[in-house]
Amino acid sequence: YIFLWDRFRAIRKDFILQNYTKGGLLDATVVDVFERMARFFVAMERRMAPHPQWRSGPAHGKHNAESLSETLTALRAFYDMAAERGEEVSPHEAEFTAYWILFFDHEHGAEVARLLDRLALRRPELRAA
């Protein structure tokens, strides 16, 4: 786990240095990489959550939660950038938006509500719901 976590952290930092997350660069490949990393962190959380040492041990659970938070936040920024440009960079946006909502709802309830409003405005299937 530590080896992969460290490599994923380096990849995220590399994309930040290349100006992807805040500089307006957007590429479907980058989004795919971030989605794969998020899936790994979600899977690790699911698999390791029952183990008491995951949270109280050498902080792997904390590292995982922080990495998932950073990755999901970057994905939201990518999806928002794509929407502003009228592009679609991933067919998996709904899946990762759901992860984002589940992860951040307890901390950022108002922000989640604003996100849902924005999504409903640009997605006909959500407007009908």
Image (spheres, rainbow, N blue to C red):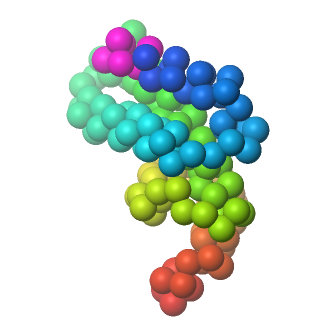
Count of numbered labels shown in the rendering: 0
Residue 30 lies in the magenta-colored region: no
Image x and y of residue 93, in percent? 48, 59
Residue lying at 36% horizontally and 18% vertically, measured from the top left:
4
The answer to whether residue 57 is seen in the rendering is no
In the figure, 70 relative to 53: above or below? below
Magenta segment, principal secondary structure?
Answer: helix
Residue 49 is left or right of residue 9, and the answer is left
Q: Quadrant of the N terminus?
A: top left
In the figure, 62 relative to 42: above or below? above
Residue lying at 57% horizontally and 34% vertically, measured from the top left:
70
Residue 33 is left or right of residue 47, and the answer is right
Magenta stretch in the rendered image: 1-6
Image x and y of residue 31, in percent? 50, 45
In the figure, 73 relative to 102: above or below? above
In the figure, 83 relative to 123: above or below? above
Location of residue 114 (image quadrant): bottom right
Residue lying at 67% horizontally and 38% vertically, measured from the top left:
21
